[in-house]
Image (tube, rainbow, N blue to C red):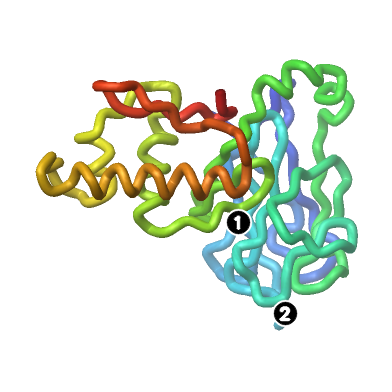
Amino acid sequence: MSGMSRYGQAPRLTGLVSGVQPQEYVIEREACTLGRGADCDVIIGGGLISRLHATISRQGPRYLITDAGSRNGTFVNGCRISAPHLLDDDDLIGLGSPEAKVRFVDPDPTDLAAAPDTSAQTAERLHYDPHAMIFILDGKALDLTLMQTRLLLHLYRNAGAVCDREDCAEAIWGRDYDPGMDAGALDQALNSLRRALGRVAPGASLIQTRRGLGYVLHLNGI
């Protein structure tokens, strides 16, 4: 899926200070990176800016900015964000300090606001940011172990479909499932993942057990 909006125009970032390269960046992909590193999509110089400082990724018809573990933080309209933040048209983004470095411009803010029901259906409670390599649930970054991340990523890539125990085990350990050795460990992995999800979204049943078949991930819970 390209980064084009539902109405055919892509959002963009425009530089507000010198040292932003390029001065205008059209977001045509699912995600883009910001920082002072040469491999970032938008390069912004400055001693307070990390090599990989922040990412912007699509969430339904909207875009989400996430701090990538920078030392000095990411700011939107002068306020430091502590969790992934949904961007609005004309939002000012600061890296390392509240000073605005780039502006987020959405060509279709009126059109998106005119169709709230459709947008709500498209947005999902659980979202994966491939650049930051983190899961975001209800706007909050999940703190997961490597095992939990591997399992959730497998379920996420097959959301809505039944994932059998053999495939889940292979996703975690990278080898064939051994019922005698792995059954208990797999149950523990699933239970710990459910608890991690429940700490952020109490009462939301995102992983459903299909007895005798496997497990299904529902991105909005059931």
Disc assigned to residue 48: 2
Q: In which quadrant of the rendered image does the C terminus lie? A: top right
Amino acid type, mark 1: Thr
Up-down relation of residue 162 to residue 19 (above or below): above
Q: Between residues 71 and 140, which one lies in front from this camera angle?
A: 140
Residue 220 placement, left or right of 12: left
Q: Residue at x 72, y 23 (%)?
A: 120
| Residue 74 image point, x, y percent | 74, 64
Mark 1, other Cα within 10 Å: few <14 / some 14–19 / many ≥20: many
Residue occupying image coordinates x 59% and y 49%: 199
Indicate the position of residue 33 as horizontal and vertical percent values.
60, 56
Could you say which quadrant of the image residue 117 lies in? top right
* 106 w.r.t. 6: above or below: below
Mark 2 element type: loop
In this rendered view, identify the residue nearer to me: 24 or 193.
Answer: 193
Among the 4 quarters of the image, the one containing residue 214? top left
The x, y position of residue 84, in whole percent, is 69, 51
Neighbor class of circle 2 (other Cα within 10 Å; few <14, some 14-19, many 20+) is some
| Residue at the (51%, 49%) spot, across then down | 196
Amino acid on which disc 2 is placed: Leu
Quickly name the residue at label 1.
Answer: 33
Asked whether, in this view, residue 56 is left or right of residue 17, the answer is left
Camera-side residue of 47 and 153: 153
Calculate the distance from the C-alpha at mark 2 to the C-alpha at mark 1: 16 Å
Q: Position of residue 5 (x, y in %)?
A: 70, 28
In depth, the one of 161 and 184 nearer the eye is: 184
Compare marks 2 and 1 and give the one earlier in the sequence: 1
